[in-house]
Image: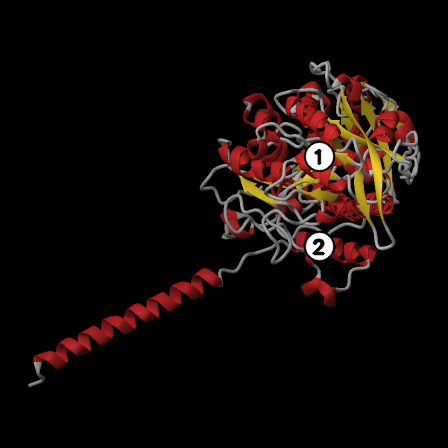
Amino acid sequence: MIPRRFFALAVFCGVALISLFLFSRRSEVTLSVPVPIPDSWADTLEQTWEQAWQSSGYNKQDDAHDDNQKWESPPKKPGFIQGEPGGKEAGSNTKPLAVGTATPHGTGSYLKPTPFPPPDPPLPDVVNVAIVESGGTNEETTAALINAFGTQNYTQLSLYMLQQRYGIGEIINNFNLSHPILVNKSSEDFEAAVRADDVSPHIIVSATCEADLLALNEPLTKLLERKDTYLFCVIHQPERWVEQNLIEKLQPWINAQLVDLVALSHHTARYLRTDVINAWDFNATVTVRHLAPLFPMQLPNDELARAMSSTLGADTFQYPIAMHGDFDATRHNYSEVFDKIVELKDRVKKGVKIETKEETKIEKREISLHILGERAPPDVPKKVKPLLSVDHALPLQEQYEILSKSYILLPAFSFGSESDYLSKLASWCIPAALIAGVPFAADDNILDAYGYVSREAVWYRLESEDEMKIAERVLMWSEEEHRRKKASVRKHTQLIIQRQLGVVDEWIRMGIRRAERAGWRMKADNGEGHVADAPGPEDGINDMWW
């Protein structure tokens, strides 16, 4: 008689073998379901692929190494901020800064692409780019966008600005655009142009997206319906993007995968991702990029201005200190600067000791303060007025010439490290200093927030210093040292502008590809050609690949 324990062991082994057999058969069935594809559809698809490969000069052997041929991958985790490999968070100027999902626990969603989408198309000979600005402000940001998009050797710009204030047109005329601006009209003419098909852009750049999505909703919606235009939505006030009316206008573009958000600094892009996008009540994936709003300016040389001869028998150099803002005391600490500028003048009235390799000498510095802004100027104490020049709403060329003659710009952000300009808003004084070629006072908080700025382009503030203390320290630099510092700032600015031309080139090419794919999907959804016969989930195709 067989022992009972051997009988039990045999039964167990039999059950295990049967289970393993069934599991393997299930896997084989799941992975090997044949999908019938109509011959007509397959032939047409093969011809489409081959023609596209030949026209684009594509080499199939290079496919494994060509990232541009790949579909956008979902984020590694919700809202993960991407930068260069191995780089710090949000530290790249050349890669998408942030890919965020709208819900904290979402994994991103994608519209259903047709099977085997067409390969990336070759770039059109001329890419039509429309830049719109309907807020009547932000001329300098718009100018930076015009330079970045219009300097590409294949782009043709159409410009729709509500207002062109402060001589911005003269500055734009000095840009080295690849083609003359095709259309230069008010944003109020944009709707009629779209309705009449007078404008059919491959790329549309919304220079003030908070205003444009509301004021130009109808023409933008019409462009979206065509599925052949890609939108770059430039964000100035990230905190406003929790407003339902803005979200509702933007969501269709996100659902169509035809929009990127563009912030104006690293820290505002981070704020968009962590505090705004993740609070949206719909699940979508959107790319947040950033662009430093810089453009080239024709400015005078950087020679130090000389004042009258001093009683010390040495040269007296004018030493203008600058502030640039909108005269909003809640944003910039004017009162503290006013108090300390008088103290600084008193401390250096007898001259400063200048030491170089060749000599040590005493030079006098003629201290002055220039504040520039657009709104009503702040109240100025009587004792400060002799030192102060207030420049209100000047033409931009004059503003930047004044700034370029300064030797330090003070951001003077209110509330220090708690300033909105370090958390959720981008201050214009930072790019203004770079455009003018003047170094500004900066600590690690500012350098981290405005990551496109290098330490070589600023007067670095030590922990023990305030901004006026930096101004006093650099008073003791020689004329030649100041000249070299300002030359360094200008060189750094030119490098950023040049690098961003390459970045925007990548954006445009990406936008063209995505718009082409959106058009392919729309044709498939409309049943055009043979693509409507493509297999779907009902034929056994997994949604993940559909």
Amino acid bearing label 2: Asn
Measuring from the top left, give residue 323's x and y in whole percent. Answer: 74, 28
Q: Residue at x 84, y 30 (%)?
A: 400
Question: Which colour scheme appears in the figure?
Answer: secondary structure
Dot 1 or dot 2: first in sequence order is 2
Disc assigned to residue 120: none
Nearest to the observer: residue 407 or residue 37: 407
Q: Is residue 444 left or right of residue 223?
A: left
Q: Residue at x 67, y 52 (%)?
A: 41
Say which quarter of the image contains residue 329: top right
Dot 1 surroundings within 10 Å: few (below 14), some, or many (20 or more)?
many
Tag count: 2
Q: Is mark 1 on a helix, strand or loop?
A: strand
For mark 1, what is the residue? 231
Residue 181 seen anywhere in this rendered image of the structure = no
Q: Position of residue 442 (x, y in %)?
A: 67, 40
Residue 429 rendering spot, x and y as whole percentages: 73, 31
Q: What element carries label 2?
A: helix
| Camera-nearest residue between 174 and 540 | 174
Residue 215, given in percent of the width and then of the height, sits at: 70, 18
The residue closer to the viewer here, 312 or 251, is 312
Image: 17 above or below 423: below
Q: What residue type is labelled 1?
A: Leu
Instruction: Check the picture and name the quadrant holding the N terminus.
Output: bottom left
Residues 81 and 266: in front is 266
Marks 1/2 in contact by CB < 8 Å: the verdict is no
Residue 32 is left or right of residue 473, and the answer is left
User: Where is residue 42, by image quadrant?
Assistant: bottom right
Residue matched to label 2: 68
Asked if residue 506 is positioned above or below residue 413 in the image, the reply reads below
Distance of mark 1 from mark 2, alpha carbons?
19 Å
